[in-house]
Amino acid sequence: MRIVVALGGNALLHRGERPDAERQRANIDRAVTSLAALAQENELVITHGNGPQIGLLAVESAADPALSAPYPLDLLGAQTQGMIGSMLARALRAALPGRAVAALVTHTVVRADDPAFDRPTKFVGQVFPRELAQSLARARGWHVAADTTGWRRVVPSPEPAGIVETDTVRALLAAGTLVICAGGGGVPVTADRDTGALTGVDAVIDKDLTAVLLAEELKADFLLILTDVRYVYTGYGTPGRRPVLDATPAELRRGDFPDGSMRPKTEAAARFVERTGGLAAIGALDSAYEIVHGKAGTLVRPELPIG
């Protein structure tokens, strides 16, 4: 079975944790234990989020006196692909001796006229108290918004329209390679209609929506979205929260999920199931094997035929 696995950025660096390299390595090692068990039986393509990591690099870049201007988000996204991809590749090679593993810097094409450029919604970086977030917004020209636990920077998040390196990923899979690609949704670029030349844009693409596109183009059987909670919950953050054990795309879309956290994941799972007839699931980072085998997480399945 071919499985596309999307690792959440907040699962690789948990909310409230110090953004130290050792902490991220420890979280990745824990995830890889479960992923390696899946890889023994299946063909894996792994993508990952980068919200906390790109936000940290953006803060450092904005504060660096050696720079005349901060690095744009497309280049910071490429940096996070290299950093997280390297940590994942090393951990996977250690867990799967003899298995070929490749981390590929991947570019995702977006439309230059995407209305998302006028409506920043994608959370990046750490959580701040409201007053500090608003102060940073004034000083650095940021947009900020309330997240579930505080205030964070928000940036444009255009829809992915195509993945430049899909054929390269297919070739690597055909050679038996476990591929890490499209990290952070891919480096966002526009493509010239006449020449195909790529130009970076200052945005961050939702990695779950890119994972859907990747899974469709690779004809994957299963889309597995791993995050920092064990299930999709209704009433999350309230005393009446309840885990959703399985759902159809229509049932998921009726749920009241936060736009900046769970909503993109449920939408991605719903899209994949609707477009391919395959299965999707959402669950905790360290439970990948159990989720695919129906013992954990929220399963998203097609509508059952009537009659």
Image (cartoon, helix red, strand yellow):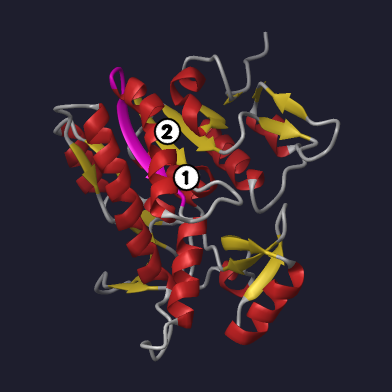
Q: Residue at x 85, y 33 (%)?
A: 239
Magenta stretch, residue numbers: 40-49
- In the depicted structure, whether residue 205 falls above or below residue 42: below
Q: Residue furthest top?
A: 307
Q: Is residue 304 visible?
A: yes
Mark 1 or mark 2: whose residue is earlier in sequence: 1
Dot 2: what SS?
helix
Q: Which quarter of the rendering shows the C terminus?
A: top right
Question: Marks 1/2: CA distance?
Answer: 8 Å
Q: Residue at x 29, y 56 (%)?
A: 82
Tell me the kind of residue under disc 1: Leu
Residue 258: where, in percent of width, then height? 72, 48
Please state if 53 lies on the left or on the right of 172 as rendered: right
Q: Residue at x 71, y 30 (%)?
A: 251
Q: Residues within 10 Å of mark 1 (few under 14, many from 20)?
A: many
* Quarter occupied by residue 75: bottom left
- In the depicted structure, whether residue 109 falls above or below residue 271: below
Q: Which residue is mark 1?
A: 12
Q: Which residue is mark 2?
A: 31
Q: Name the foreground residue: 306 vs 245.
A: 245
Residue 6: where, in percent of width, then height? 45, 40
Q: Which quarter of the rendering shows the N terminus?
A: top left
Q: Residue furthest bottom?
A: 68
Q: Residue at x 17, y 33 (%)?
A: 174
| Type of secondary structure dominating the magenta stretch | strand
Tell me the kind of residue under disc 2: Ala
Mark 1 touches mark 2? (CB < 8 Å):
yes
Q: Give the number of marks.
A: 2
